[in-house]
Image: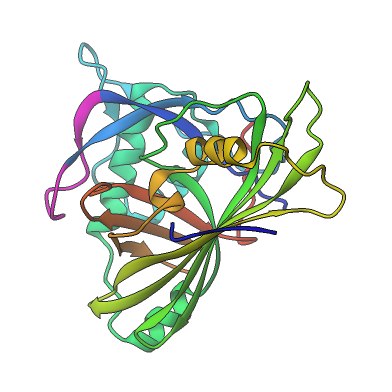
Amino acid sequence: MISQCKHSAIALLLAAFSIHEVADAFAPSLQSRVPFLASTPLAAEGLAPATTKERPTAEKTEGDGESSIDVDMTAAEAKTALIELIPRMTGQAEEYRAVESYVNILEENYSPVQTIDFLNLAVSGEWQLLFSTNLMGRANKRMRLTELIQEIDASGFRGNITNSAEWMYAEEGETFDAYGKFSVQCSYTINQGARMVVDLDGHELRPTSGSKFPEDVPKLVGYLNRAIPKEIFDPSGHAMDTTYLDADLRIVRMTGPTHEGVRDIFMRKGSLEINPN
């Protein structure tokens, strides 16, 4: 185990993002407006397959390239469309406009949890990251992420958050003979509504039994830093606002100096099956 202080039946979809000038991201009812980030799929090999329905269509409007989304769609329809679209994305701008629209519908129709006990019950457990608007790095052929989980352990107005990434690493050649788990350990307090003010407690790199021990650990951590969304790798100085929450889907908006307005979309681990095919 290596600690760096202070500082599956379901496939994980990670994407490498670059800024793309499309429509303002998310509804004006939210506190800030940020440019949506476009991406190309991460070239991470070996992600586990699963199952889902046919991808919803996001048709281009004649002349301007805007995706055609039914503004009268219900929150349930938007949720279904969002879950079906994310694993099939190919990096097209209209796909990101569609995600933006579906998220807007869910957030606009969401009624926040009214009691701390119910909030703790609803958010506790393991959540698998499906999508982030803040994954800026490019994939490295030596690094594979096979899963990224956020586990929340809630107790009253405080709790712990652990972000865990399962990784495989080919330090030499093409053989992925080093593998294990990288954990970001955090604590949080709730000071208003459902806002979680997060403190980073430390990082932990733990090779799995049977793994080759990496010779250049800082280089491995650097690859992990580029592969993991920045607000997941180091959320210090930020707070998480829950903008949508139900039994199996959770949308978080980051508030803070670096990642203001970033959205992360999570699915409760084991609740649904997704097939990117």
* Magenta-span inclusion, residue 266: no
Question: At 27% from the left edge and 51% from the top edge, which residue is drawn?
Answer: 105
Question: At 20% from the left edge and 15% from the top edge, which residue is drawn?
Answer: 64
Q: Horizontally, is 153 left or right of 176 in the view?
A: left
Q: Position of residue 211 (x, y in %)?
A: 82, 46
The overriding secondary structure of the stretch rendered in magenta is loop
Q: Horizontally, is 202 left or right of 28 in the view?
A: right
Residue 171 in the image: above or below residue 155: above
Front-most of 218 and 156? 218
Residue 184 at least partly seen = no
Residue 7 in the image: above or below residue 218: below
Residue 19, image quadrant: top left
* Magenta-span inclusion, residue 30: yes
Q: Position of residue 40 (x, y in %)?
A: 46, 23
Q: Residue furthest top?
A: 63
Question: At 61% from the left edge and 56% from the top edge, which residue is drawn?
Answer: 272
Residue 15 in the image: above or below residue 271: above
Residue range corresponding to the magenta coloring: 21-33
